[in-house]
């Protein structure tokens, strides 16, 4: 492209304000022409159609309106979409990619806080933090390690389910502790797993051997309920189950039975259904911690998404390249 790309935004106003701080917008203005500085919420409006007609590259984010082949009728100059968030499946028709529109996702930026959260849950879980907190609240006394499951992260085996962006970041973080790491993912080889610092095993073996199981798989027709009664039964007493991916990956009823029995500890940032019924035992069990979907980018972490989006625009403007391109084949295994 002989001129700077012409850029517009399509996302929620609040998401735009959080992701694109003034200095990030200044960097964008130096490499691109911003057609309309305010984000487009409705791509069918007259204002949106006028902006789309001039737009080479559309930056989307949380709250992005649906983009399908009809959108392309108005966006005749559109060449690329950069999503300043995670998955594009929620708003983008895959046929848009097949029309030749290039797409980039900033999921790798969102993967960092999710992996950080899962890693923190690993350490807290192995320290039996939720159980000790409940004990202290009940007794107002000192700690009592009797009847506690094994405590500590030294020399344990940690299982990671899914070599997704978050899973890979989690694997990187796990290299900082003295643990043996297992990985279950049908899409990578044993050599690839070894390069990531893990031993590739099947899901059953991972469940049997791991003191901690952290889930980082996408929710698809084949992965829904992948951690069910059978897999939970394979887990050792005192195993810590962490889910920062999608609630539907775990059979909630089966997990509830195991957690009520006190056999498994759980740190759940996502659940199914979300939220759980008000009378769910998972809210009150001393071995279960539920957080309200906070692992992904929040607060100042959101600006990392905007920074990566602008970096992708810069690469595209310089040599028609993305470092985080989404291809049609990715849709089948995307979160």
Image (cartoon, rainbow, N blue to C red):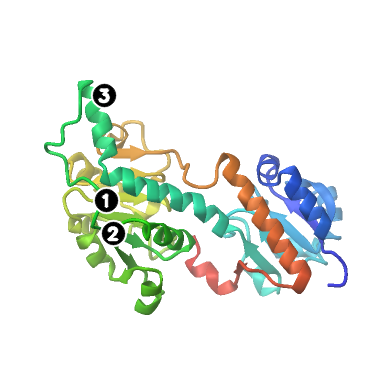
For the residues labelled 3 and 1, the Cα–Cα distance comes to: 24 Å
Residue, x 69% and y 63% (percent of image)?
312
Direction from residue 63 to residue 253 in the image, left or right: left
- Mark drawn on residue 137: 3
Dot 2: within a 10 Å radius of its alpha carbon, few (fewer than 14), some, or many (20 or more) residues?
Answer: some
Residue, x 12% and y 38% (percent of image)?
147
Nearer to us in this view, 147 or 288: 147
Q: Quadrant of residue 171?
A: bottom left
Direction from residue 276 to residue 30 in the image, left or right: right
Q: Is residue 220 visible?
A: yes
Which badge, 3 or 2, is on the more N-terminal residue? 3
Nearer to us in this view, 55 or 24: 24
Figure check: 292 above or below 81: above
Which badge, 3 or 1, is on the more N-terminal residue? 3
Dot in front, 3 or 2: 2
Q: Quadrant of residue 50?
A: bottom right
- Mark drawn on residue 179: 2
Residue 182: percent from left, percent from top: 30, 65
Which badge, 1 or 2, is on the more N-terminal residue? 1
- Is mark 1 in CB contact (under 8 Å) with mark 2? yes
Residue 257: percent from left, percent from top: 21, 44
Figure check: 8 above or below 281: below
Dot 3: within a 10 Å radius of its alpha carbon, few (fewer than 14), some, or many (20 or more) residues?
Answer: few
- Is mark 3 in CB contact (under 8 Å) with mark 1? no
Direction from residue 42 to residue 173 in the image, left or right: left
Which element is circle 2 on? strand
Q: Is residue 66 visible?
A: no
Residue, x 49% and y 62% (percent of image)?
165
The N terminus lies in which quarter of the figure? bottom right
Which element is circle 3 on? helix
Residue, x 29% and y 44% (percent of image)?
125
The residue indicated by pointer 1 is: 153
């Amino acid at each position: 492209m002989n001129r700077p790309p012409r850029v517009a935004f399509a996302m929620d106003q609040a998401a735009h304000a959080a992701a694109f701080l003034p200095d990030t917008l200044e960097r964008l203005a130096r490499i691109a022409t911003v057609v309309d500085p305010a984000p487009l919420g409705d791509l069918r409006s007259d204002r949106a159609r006028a902006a789309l007609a001039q737009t080479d590259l559309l930056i989307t984010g949380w709250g992005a309106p649906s983009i399908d082949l009809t959108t392309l009728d108005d966006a005749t100059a559109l060449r690329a979409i950069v999503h300043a968030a995670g998955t594009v499946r929620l708003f983008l028709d895959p046929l848009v990619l097949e029309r030749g529109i290039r797409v980039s996702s900033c999921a790798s930026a969102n993967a960092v806080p999710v992996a950080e959260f899962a890693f923190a849950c690993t350490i807290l879980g192995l320290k039996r933090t939720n159980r000790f907190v409940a004990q202290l609240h009940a007794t107002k006394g000192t700690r009592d390690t009797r009847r506690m499951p094994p405590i500590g992260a030294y020399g344990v085996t940690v299982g990671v389910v899914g070599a997704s962006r978050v899973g890979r970041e989690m694997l990187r973080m796990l290299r900082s502790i003295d643990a043996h790491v297992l990985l279950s993912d049908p899409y990578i080889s044993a050599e690839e797993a070894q390069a990531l610092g893990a031993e590739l095993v099947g899901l059953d073996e991972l469940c049997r051997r791991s003191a901690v199981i952290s889930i980082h798989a996408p929710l698809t027709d084949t992965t829904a309920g992948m951690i069910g009664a059978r897999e939970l039964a394979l887990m050792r007493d005192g195993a810590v189950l962490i889910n920062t991916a999608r609630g539907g990956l775990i059979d909630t009823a089966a997990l509830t039975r195991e957690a009520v029995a006190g056999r498994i500890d759980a740190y759940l940032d996502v659940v199914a259904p979300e939220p759980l019924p008000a009378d769910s035992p998972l809210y009150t069990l001393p071995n279960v911690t539920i957080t309200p979907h906070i692992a992904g980018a929040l607060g100042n972490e959101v600006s990392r998404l905007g920074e990566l989006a602008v970096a992708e625009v810069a690469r595209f403007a310089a040599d028609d390249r993305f470092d985080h391109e989404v291809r049609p084949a990715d849709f089948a295994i995307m979160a």
